[in-house]
Amino acid sequence: MDKILVHGGHTLTGSVKISGSKNSALPILAATLLTKEPCVIHHVPDLSDIHYMLQIISHLGAQVERASGTVRIEAESIKTVAPYEIVRKMRASVCVLGPLLGREKEATVSLPGGCVIGDRPIDLHLKGFEALNAAHRVEQGNVKVFASELRGSVINLRGKLGPTVLGTGNVMMAAVLATGTSVIEGAAAEPEVVDLANFLTKMGAKIEGAGTSRIIIEGVKELHGAEHEVIPDRIEAGTFLVAAAIAGKEVQLKRVEPTHLTAVIDALNQSGYRTTSGVGTLTLHGNGQAKPLQLTTEPYPGFPTDMQAQMCALLSRTAGSSTVMETVFPQRFMHVSELKRMGADIELEGSTAIIKGINRLSGAPVMASDLRASAALVLAGLQAEGVTEVNRVYHIDRGYESIDEKLNGLGAQIERVKA
């Protein structure tokens, strides 16, 4: 098992290219199961979650070829059962339910279990499938969905903590092959949902309203193959923006979509950091004196929960008192205890972190608990005195393509070693 050693105190400068979006690529790869014809997906990031998804797709009978960020999938004939030994490694594997149900009218997928950042059930996914005339049952840890015919319907997917991104994509993938018209109310508006809708449209689906809370889908009889390029990863881009704010002089992001990062850019601007954007580029300029913030995570286009931990790392050394309220996953503060091991002054009051900025952090052995927490600990290490040892970095490999190499390319000193 690898660990990452971050040697603090080095200035970041230069440019970095942002990878394709993990949260777009996963459902888009699953969507290739909707057709017998070949699909070609470009700009697929090299991540462990992507490897697991391709394993699942291969297990289901598709032919998969991968080279240099491009994946070709041909699912001429497919199976409808994804067992636990494959699914258990990644919660997002449930997004094969929608395409299997849409194409074969049945699917059995092992439930992937809980998540360290809090309860993330698939109840809304199943509610959406039921609205399309499918039934479901759970047996021996497996969920089976099945229908004699999928019929369009009005579906409300808004949960108690907001819309479900994966659920919106899953139901959308089933609905494109349903008879009649489906309307998804309370749909997630994230760019990743729009990217999936764009790919499905290239395949012959008829979808309107993606990117809003109301998506209208007119079912078609069949879909065909298509070629598509995955959008840039806005969370990776946001993470590098925060890294630049923490330790940068001037850092430019390349192959990025600034409009997907409005809430993150606004927060950094409010804290005193200056950003400039161009066509596919975004630059953060160094800042002498940052100001504290009061942040609240919200569904898109609000401040993303996936950037909360990274902002905690930044604000731990921002003079004054900052607050970060987590409304999407209220339990998502596992990184706080590890930041405190590095000297951060952070107190939790329910789902709110109260952060008092200090002058220095000290390198220490820390433990990554989830994907974004691990990134936050690496960022904290950039500004700490001494060496920060980040353990369990398999978490970071789920969602960041070569983050250590990319940061080193900007001037950081990071080593990846065997634990």
Image (tube, rainbow, N blue to C red):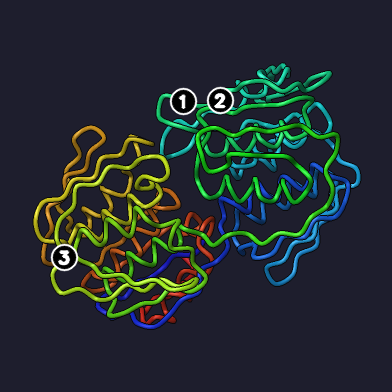
Residue 246 quadrant? bottom left
User: The disc labelled 3 sits on which kind of residue?
Assistant: Ala
Q: Relative to 64, is 408 above or below? A: below
- Of all residues shown, which one is farthest toward the left? 320
In terms of sequence position, does the residue under pointer 1 or pointer 3 come before the other?
1
User: The disc labelled 1 sits on which kind of residue?
Assistant: Gly
Q: CA distance from mark 2 to mark 1?
A: 7 Å
In terms of sequence position, does the residue under pointer 2 or pointer 1 come before the other?
2
Residue 56's spot in the image, x, y percent? 73, 46
In the rendered image, which residue does mark 3 sit on? 290
Towards the viewer: 183 or 336:
183
In terms of sequence position, does the residue under pointer 2 or pointer 3 come before the other?
2
Q: Which mark is residue 124?
A: 2
Q: Secondary structure at mark 1?
A: loop
Q: CA distance from mark 2 to mark 3?
A: 41 Å
User: The disc labelled 2 sits on which kind of residue?
Assistant: Leu
Question: 67 left or right of 124?
Answer: right
Q: Which mark is residue 159?
A: 1
Q: Secondary structure at mark 2?
A: helix
Residue 52's spot in the image, x, y percent? 66, 51
Give the residue drawn at x 41%, y 59%.
391
Question: 66 left or right of 314?
Answer: right
Confirm or deny contact between disc 2 and disc 1 (CB under 8 A): yes
- Of all residues shown, which one is farthest toward the right? 77
- Other-residue count near label 1 (Cα within 10 Å), few / some / many at <14 / 14–19 / ≥20: few
Towards the viewer: 136 or 34:
34
Q: Relative to 204, is 2 above or below? A: below
Give the residue drawn at x 18%, y 52%.
293
- Other-residue count near label 3 (Cα within 10 Å), few / some / many at <14 / 14–19 / ≥20: many
Confirm or deny contact between disc 1 and disc 3 (CB under 8 A): no
Q: Relative to 30, is 280 above or below? A: below
Residue 197's spot in the image, x, y percent? 65, 45
